[in-house]
Image (tube, rainbow, N blue to C red):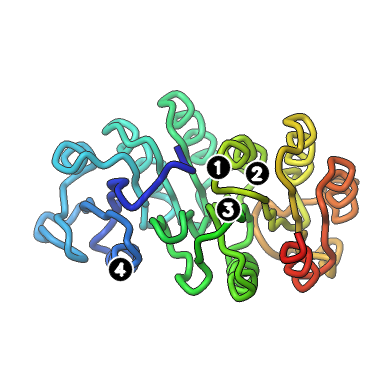
Amino acid sequence: MIHTLSRETPVIVQGITGRMGRTHAGLMRAYGTNIVGGTSTRTDIKEAAGVPVFADCAEAVAATGAIASVFMAPPLETEAAVREALAAGIKLVVTVAEGVPLHDAIAIGRAVNQAGAFWVGASTPGLAIPGETKLGFLPDVCLRPGPLAIMTKSGTLSYEVGYRLAREGLGQSIWVGVGGDPVKGLRFADLLPMFFEDPRTEAIVLVGEVGGTEEEECAEAYARLGRRKPLHALIAGREAKEGVSMGHAGALVHGESGTLDSKKRRLEAAGARVYASLEDLVRGCVGG
């Protein structure tokens, strides 16, 4: 479903009357996203960011036909919000909050799978089909239609990657921020089949980081699925000091697993091109 999103896809914003919800609902609409409504516990507000406000997802979906939702509210409310969206028939949920409790994230993942839906998050800047729609708060200046599928753990680093590539004339077919939490929705390996099937995507850019095993999992999937499109990778954290807490909640190194060397070795063995710097990545993508 992710790679078939378009400017026609009806989207609601859960928590639309909050400061973040109202602001980013307006920015998403300005980009072209088909925001058809929002939900709020505020019974005194009937409109926000130019769209109607409903009491819950069931009411919003019944009135608008929405199939996707962006949740803009605190982490402790995320599980209940996702369950409400799934019960209403929403098939794609994007949750941007950082700090969703681990057990809540596990429960969300189980509920999403049982509903046959997709979850992007937590702790994600969102996703976009440049020139069509964006769900979240990706900066417009980084988005340009083109042949590259970007998947990333880091928001800010990927903004710089997208901006520099766009400046060189290389835009994106799709952009997905998987988030930096240890338990999440879609992971790098889950996205590969979608990118391989997408006719607009000619190559894939992975923006990873030290810690966790997601890049190693992606390398295994890339080799298993046949390396059908070029994979360019940049792993952040070369200067990260051992034993120092920093970065995302999922950036944990366990023995030899999750290190920069482990990720680089596994990705290169699978056939990916791994770059030492952002500048090298841009040059490598531009050069094909």
Assess whether mark 4 and mark 1 are in contact (beta carbons under 8 angstroms).
no
Q: Residue at x 43, y 48 (%)?
A: 94
Q: Which residue is drawn at 89% across and 42% down?
A: 269
Q: Which residue is drawn at 65% across and 59% down?
A: 248
Q: Label 1 to label 4, Cα distance in Å?
A: 27 Å
Numbered circle sitting on residue 188: 2
Q: Nearer the viewer, residue 145 or 96?
A: 145
Check disc 4 and give the amino acid type.
Ala
**In the visual, does 23 lie left or right of 283?**
left
Q: Residues within 10 Å of mark 2 (few under 14, many from 20)?
A: many
What residue is disc 4 on? 30
Which comes before the other along the chain, label 1 or label 4?
Answer: 4
The quadrant in which residue 192 appears is top right
> Residue 161: x and y, percent?
65, 68
Which comes before the other along the chain, label 2 or label 1?
Answer: 2
What residue is disc 1 on? 199
What residue is disc 3 on? 179
Q: Label 2 to label 1, Cα distance in Å?
A: 19 Å
